[in-house]
Image: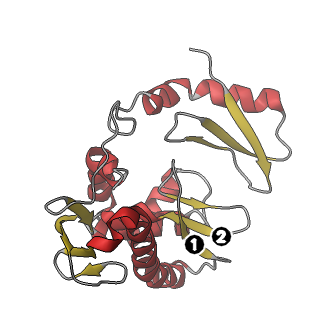
Amino acid sequence: MLLEYEVKYSTRRTLNITVERDRKITVRAPEHLSLEKIDSIVQSKKQWIKEKIHHAQKYPETPVVKKFVSGETLMYLGKNYQLLVVDEDIEGIDFNQRFRISRKNQVRANGLFKTWYLEQALQKIEPLAKQYAKYLGVEYAELKTSEMKYRWGSCTPANNIIFNWRIIKAPMYVVNYLVAHELVHLIEDNHTPRFWNILSIQVPYYQKAKAWLKTNGHLLEVDF
């Protein structure tokens, strides 16, 4: 198996390998590491990378696309809620144990829902990030929720933390895990035993959250 990967140099202290959701391999490395050394490390992780690339749940063969019609269901915080398309004049999305949109907005429902999910994600994630940052004794520069096609979250070399808005579809305990996960990266770059030890103190149920994502993560990527 020939491994093709992109190397991104940064001020980070250790090397990190990520298999994105399009199967692209990205290697983030300290500036002092030679390409030969980087390749040696990547090759030593070949089996792990192969398993990630062929993860059936992470890379479903046939993506599911939902339609914005009455009776359809959409996921939010781990539960599926029914969608009703009504004649009533509703601006944006109305949610109260079910989703409602105005028939006049049906053609632009995709954009309206994306905006709604982005807003809900930020409202839920921002206080969690502040809470975990305080517990961990770290500071982040900026927090964003955005369209991240291939990752649930990211901690940048500039200490910005970015979250895929789709994680707000997951149960709240999974959201907690993902937020804490990125903030622990402000202490430990890689997924070392130290990383998981620190995370386990903040999120004792992190294994349960990881298992949920492994089994159900593909559901978060359904449009919608």
Can I make out residue 200 in this image? no
- Mark 1: amino acid: Lys
Mark 2 crowd level (few <14, some 14–19, many ≥20, 10 Å Cα): some
Asked if marks 1 and 2 touch (Cβ < 8 Å), the reply is yes
Q: Which residue is mark 2?
A: 160
Q: Earlier in the sequence, mark 1 or mark 2?
A: 1
* Image position, residue 66 (x, y; %): 28, 51
Residue mark closest to the camera, 1 vs 2: 1
Q: Secondary structure at mark 2?
A: loop
Residue occupying the point 68% across, 77% down:
141
Q: Residue at x 63, y 80 (%)?
A: 139
Residue 144 disc label: 1
- Answer yes or no: is residue 124 visible: yes
Name the quadrant of the N terminus.
top right
- Residue 196 is situated, as x and y percent measured from the top left of the image, at 45, 57
Which of the two residues, 9 or 197, is positioned nearer the viewer here?
9
Q: Amino acid at mark 2?
A: Asn
Cα distance in 3D space between marks 1 and 2: 8 Å
Closer to us: 3 or 44: 3
Q: Is residue 56 left or right of residue 185?
A: left
